[in-house]
Each structure stands twice: as structure tokens, then as C-alpha cells.
Amino acid sequence: MAKEIKTIGVLTSGGDAPGMNAAVRAVVRTAISKGLKVKGIMRGYSGILNNEIIDMDARSVSNIISRGGTILFTARCEEFKQPEYQDKAVEICKSHGIDGLVVIGGDGSFRGAKDLAAKGINTIGVPGTIDLDIACTDYTIGFDTAVNTAVEAIDRIRDTSMSHEKVSIIEVMGRHAGYIALWSGIANGAEDILLPEKHNYDPDKLVKHIVENRRQGKKLHIIVNAEGIGHSEEMAKRIEEETGISTRVSILGHIQRGGSPTATDRVHASVMGAFAVDLLCEGKSNRVVAYKDGKYVDFDIEEALAMQKDLPEYVYQVSRYLTI
Ligand code: ADP
Ligand code: F6P
């Protein structure tokens, strides 16, 4: 018989993502609705080690569903990768009566969650990252907002790029993954979308494409470049030298991580947060919440971390057809 959970801890870890607050709110209110106590852990895993743990009630999460960032703050905590710090974290969780933990973050955070689960704290991961780079799930909290922010920014760049008949390179986030680049590139009708998964940055081809497009009457050329490819400034220099067309770089950066979450992010975050509490109440641990083929499901964390995610090939092909 699984031990009944009485107190749930919740933390956000890794890069923040719009919608994390909605997930925290869902964890807190679902747990309280089920008669459990909730403890908020500040600053991710470092908050456990530093004993930054607060009591939360339904009012602690009032008016946060529409807010970007995370009210619990977030952090990257290198020392937490070491077993002795994880042992200390388990002790501190136990001293607060925390017998179930919800970790909202990306795959790095899930590795920490797996270690805590192995050491006896029932732990569930909720995918929160703008990068959409978690293989077991079709959706991660924050992606939709980040893409919409990038799309709005690129629309603005398109206006000025068009007026001056320039080439514009827009570098978007995503770490090693190209999802933000692919989605925002399609949504903005970018002429080129450069993706780490496709290794498709070929300077000679890019220059040829720009020249060919000009010949065919295109007035501007938008290149959405994924952070995983990078080197946007070098790219611009080479394009200018070889085509004589003025080329500008905009690196969107952290603007993509902030802002009020879209309805899609708020709803997924709310359901995923509640689902995580349900799993803990069923006695489950070492699981990650996922949205797969239109359903909310859960996977073993280790299995989830071992899965490979491929960019949808057909979507990529469509992006190629549409740039003529
Ligand atoms: P994300 O969760 O967004 O992928 P990181 O990769 O930076 O972000 O991971 C967030 C935190 O998770 C790290 O700072 C660390 O505290 C913890 N973490 C990452 N990798 C591991 C690991 N291999 N073992 C234990 N904890 C880890
Ligand atoms: O994982 C989210 C993310 O924004 C990535 O897209 C990016 O590579 C990274 O975090 C940036 O992290 P930091 O803000 O710590 O530089």
C-alpha cells in the first residue's frame, strides 16, 4: 500500500516559462481541495537546500494566472547534481513534512526529480519550458506564449525590413531545439528557417536563395535563425559582403520568456498542475506529466528522459514549399 500523501511541496526550476504561475496555482488549489497541505519552495532546488520553504494557501496564488515568470522564483543549482546535496534535500523536505513534490521545469529539472524520487520523496515532473524540447510530450508550458511573442516581434521587424528592402536575421531561443524557430518561421512566412536538427545552415545556399528571391521580385528576406545554430552576426556580414544587400540582426532573447501567458498555456498549465497532484494522491512517484495525442498522460521519468524527439518532417517540408 502506498503511503498516503499529506503535504505537497511545489517548486519551479530551470528557465522560467509563461504559464508556470498557472501551474503553481493549480497544484496549490488542487491539493487544498483534496485536503492536503502545500509548501512553496522558493528558487528551485537551491530553495530546498537553503530552507526557503513557505506555507501556501488558496489565497497565496490569487491573481497569478495571468502573470508571466514564476512567483516561486527559479534557479539553476549546480550542486544539486551531487548525491550528498540530494541527501540533504531529502532530509530538509522530510523536516517540513513534505512527502510529495511537484517539480515544474525542463528535462534538467526532471533529472533532479528522478534523483529525489529514488531517495524516497514521491516526485512528479510537470513540463515547463519554452523550448518544447521534452520528448515524451507534445506540449510544454510556455511554448505557445514564446512563439506568439516571437511572431509579434518578427511581424514588426518585417514592416521595417520591407520598407528598407533589407535582409533580416531574427535569432530566436530554443537552446538545442528548433521548435520556436520552426513555428515562428512558418507563422511569419520567413524565407529561410535555420534549424539545428536539420543542420541546414549552408552560407552559399543562403546567399543564392536571397539573390534568387530578389530576382523573382521579393522585396525582403526574413531569416529565422534558431539559437542552436547561432552565429547570426557572422551570417549577416557574409550576406552583406556577398549580395551587397543591407542585412540586420535582431536577437530576441529573454523577451520570449516573459509576458502574460496565452490561454493555451494557462489551460495546459492548469490541467497539468492538477494532474500532477492527482498522480501523487494515487501513490505515484518518479513520473512526468505529458500531453500526448490529445490526452493528459504520465510517463516514468527515466523513460521520458531517454525518448528522442524529432521535428515534424512534414511541417518542415511545408515551410519549404511556402517560401517561393
Ligand atoms: P531545465 O530544467 O529548464 O532543463 P536545467 O538543465 O538548467 O534547466 O536544470 C535545472 C536544474 O535541475 C539544475 O540547475 C539542477 O539543479 C537540476 N539538474 C539538472 N541536471 C541534473 C542532474 N543530472 N541531476 C540532478 N539535478 C539536475
Ligand atoms: O530553456 C529556456 C531557455 O530560454 C533557452 O531557450 C535558452 O537557451 C536558455 O534558456 C537561456 O538561459 P539563460 O537565460 O540562463 O541564459
Image (spheres, rainbow, N blue to C red):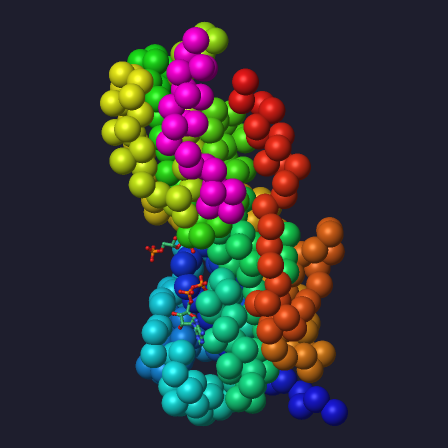
Where does ligand 2 appear, by image quarter?
Answer: bottom left
Q: Quadrant of residue 305?
A: bottom right
Q: Quadrant of residue 269?
A: bottom right
Q: Look at the picture and state if 105 lies above or below 243.
A: below
Q: Is residue 35 visible?
A: no
Q: Quadrant of residue 27?
A: bottom right
Q: Residue furthest front?
A: 204
Which quarter of the image is occupied by the N terminus? bottom right
Q: Position of residue 57 (x, y in %)?
A: 51, 72
Viewer-nearest residue: 235 or 38: 235
Q: Is residue 171 visible?
A: yes
Q: Position of residue 41 (x, y in %)?
A: 43, 74
Viewer-nearest residue: 255 or 109: 109
Q: Is residue 286 magenta?
A: no
Q: At 47% across and 76% down in the image, what residue appears?
A: 112
Q: At 69% across and 82% down in the image, what residue appears?
A: 283
Q: Is residue 207 magenta?
A: yes
Q: How many marks?
A: 0
Q: Look at the picture and state if 220 lies above or below 277.
A: above
Q: Does residue 299 appear left or right of residue 182 in this picture? A: right
Q: At 39% across and 89% down in the image, what residue appears?
A: 84
Which quarter of the image is occupied by the C terminus? top right
Viewer-nearest residue: 284 or 169: 169
Q: Position of residue 207 (x, y in %)?
A: 38, 23
Classified by dominant secondary structure, the portion drawn in magenta counts as helix
Q: Look at the picture and state if 66 lies above or below 29.
A: above
Viewer-nearest residue: 312 or 298: 312
Q: Does residue 206 appear left or right of residue 279 in this picture? A: left
Magenta stretch: give its range: 194-215
Q: Does residue 161 appear left or right of residue 176 in this picture? A: left
Q: Position of residue 258 (x, y in %)?
A: 40, 47
Q: At 54% across and 30% down in the image, what residue appears?
A: 187
